[in-house]
Image (tube, grey):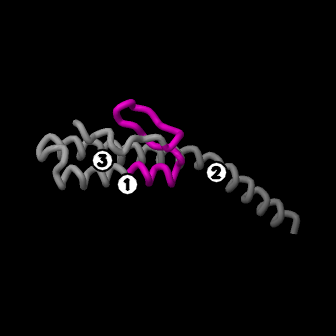
Amino acid sequence: MNTVRDSLLSLIILAAVLLCAAVPRLQAETLDRCQRRVAHAEHELHEAIRRHGSHSMIANHERRELHNARERCWRERHQSWNEHERRWHKERDWDEHEHDHD
């Protein structure tokens, strides 16, 4: 019975170590996905403004997409990527109208 208990304890310790090692990597992947989503939405908005004008329906759609990408990052990580500044914001301080005059 001692061997079974020792084996089970070893297995639990190993699982805990592996889980602790995986958490930072998963967090980094989540941040990376957030960053890519926001950067892509920023790019799509700039393209829509360039092609169709700042106040076009397509540009407004892309503004909503950018807003949604930022909101999703905020919900998941309580951070939001700012592509122009190339940095993470730890406060919900993005300007919804920053592209109105591009």
Report crowding for label 3: few under 14, some 14 to 19, many 20 or more residues within 10 A (C-alpha). many
- Amino acid type for the residue under numbered disc 1: Asn
- Amino acid type for the residue under numbered disc 3: Ala
Secondary structure under tag 3 reads helix
Name the quadrant containing residue 84: top left
Mark 1–mark 2 contact, CB under 8 Å?
no
Residue at mark 1: 68
Mark pair 2, 3: CA separation: 35 Å
In the image as oriented, which residue stretches furthest toward the bottom? 1
Dot 1 or dot 2: first in sequence order is 2
Residue at mark 2: 18
Dot 3 or dot 1: first in sequence order is 3
Tell me residue 85's x, y (percent): 39, 30
User: Quick one: 43 or 101, which is closer to the camera?
Assistant: 101
Question: Residue at the location (31% across, 54% down)?
Answer: 64
**Which residues, given as a range, are shown in magenta?**
69-92
